[in-house]
């Protein structure tokens, strides 16, 4: 956001931005000055945005002691795992159980603000695929950042849960006013030999080379249960997944298996994948990991231990589970 002239926004985009600011202030307990620093605007702008969010009914002020723990949770996680920053999505009510869809929607709004906090002019940004990243892309307001490149981390894939993988990349690029580089090849190839041949093509080589020099990457991590997206998308079988678990896999990152220490486990279908590998992601200066649900605690810890997270966005139940480890 420009400090002097705010871009024109639709009413929906404006409300989304106001909601994100309100979540940081009322939900996470950040000061107006801290929010202003993250958003790269003046403190007066944040004051006005908070006032407007109350006037429009985006925020209903209600004192609840549980919300005061949000900022402490984030700070404790940041200190425990030596992370640069942590964002904790707070539930609307401590007494009403939220569905996963509701938790994910709330987490995505917080993560959308985190993206705008972390991305900087001139960054090359890698974007993964999945229901969590698609939710983040949907929640992001339009906020142009100069000279940003957005690159697709996983070749084209589609599943019943999530639209084509390039949708995540294209939508985030549009929201940031960035140049977009999609991977013009399927994410999973029918044979190992064909995958090798495609990767040898100059155009694909050039696209994959961009993924080795990322400034920032945005991704989530999946668990290794039979409900994982890797199985749902038809990229592996339950039998192959069981073999990976037996070999020590605790999480799935960009369709690649992770061990408990965050190392890549080279098991099928990795030899038929066209996607960033774990080393590409680890080399990025800024790694924004967005995770919803305690069933992904082990996978989240694997990313943290493997140096695959500098910035973390989690829901409150997962935050508490990570602190209990």
Image (cartoon, grey):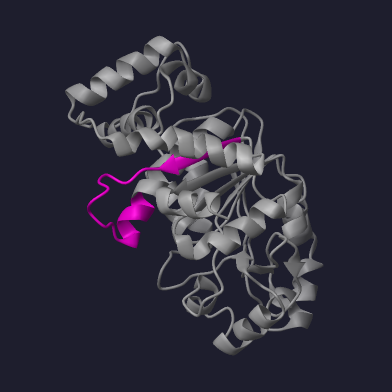
Instruction: Give the image location of residue 20, x and y in percent.
Output: 37, 34
Instruction: Give the image location of residue 292, x and y in percent.
Output: 45, 56
Q: Residue at x 33, y 29 (%)?
A: 26
Q: Residue at x 47, y 39 (%)?
A: 73
Q: Is residue 223 above or below residue 97?
A: below
Nearer to us in this view, 81 or 104: 81
- Quadrant of the snapshot with the C terminus: bottom right
Instruction: Give the image location of residue 191, x and y in percent.
Output: 71, 84
288 sits left or right of 57 in the view: right
Q: Is residue 93 magenta?
A: yes
Q: Residue at x 46, y 60 (%)?
A: 294
261 sits left or right of 133 in the view: right
232 sits left or right of 95 in the view: right
Q: Is residue 251 above or below residue 147?
A: below
Tell me if residue 177 can be seen.
no
Q: Is residue 185 magenta?
A: no
Q: Residue furthest bottom?
A: 239
Q: Is residue 162 above or below residue 33?
A: below
Q: Residue furthest front?
A: 324
Nearer to us in this view, 38 or 7: 38
The residue segment tinted magenta is: 85-105
Tell me if residue 12 can be seen.
yes
Instruction: Give the image location of residue 179, x and y in percent.
Output: 59, 40
Image mark count: 0
């Amino acid at each position: 956001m420009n400090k002097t002239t705010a871009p024109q926004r639709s009413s929906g985009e404006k409300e989304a931005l106001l909601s994100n600011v309100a979540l940081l202030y009322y939900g996470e307990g950040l000061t107006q000055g801290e929010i202003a620093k993250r958003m790269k605007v003046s403190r007066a702008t944040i004051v006005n945005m908070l006032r407007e969010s109350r006037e429009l009914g985006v925020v209903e002020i209600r004192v609840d002691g549980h919300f005061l723990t949000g900022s402490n949770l984030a700070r404790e996680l940041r200190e425990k795992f030596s992370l640069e920053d942590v964002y904790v999505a707070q539930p609307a009510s401590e007494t009403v159980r939220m569905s996963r869809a509701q938790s994910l929607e709330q987490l995505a709004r917080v993560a959308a603000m985190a993206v705008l906090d972390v991305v900087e002019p001139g960054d090359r940004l890698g974007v993964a695929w999945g229901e969590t990243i698609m939710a983040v892309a949907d929640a992001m307001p339009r906020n142009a950042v100069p000279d940003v490149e957005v690159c697709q981390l996983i070749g084209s894939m589609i599943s019943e849960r999530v639209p084509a993988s390039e949708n995540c990349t294209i939508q985030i690029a549009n929201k940031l006013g960035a140049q977009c580089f999609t991977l013009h090849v399927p994410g999973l190839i029918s044979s190992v030999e064909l995958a090798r041949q495609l990767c040898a093509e100059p155009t694909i080589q050039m696209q994959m080379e961009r993924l080795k020099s990322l400034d920032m990457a945005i991704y989530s991590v999946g668990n290794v249960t039979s409900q994982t997206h890797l199985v749902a998308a038809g990229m592996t079988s339950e039998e192959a997944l069981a073999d990976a678990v037996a070999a020590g896999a605790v999480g799935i990152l960009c369709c690649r298996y992770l061990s408990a220490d965050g190392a890549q486990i080279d098991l099928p279908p990795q030899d038929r994948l066209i996607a960033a590998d774990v080393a590409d992601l680890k080399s990025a200066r800024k790694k924004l990991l967005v995770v919803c649900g305690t069933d992904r605690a082990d996978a989240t810890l694997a990313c943290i231990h493997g140096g695959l997270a500098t910035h973390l966005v989690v829901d409150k139940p997962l935050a508490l589970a990570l602190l209990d480890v």
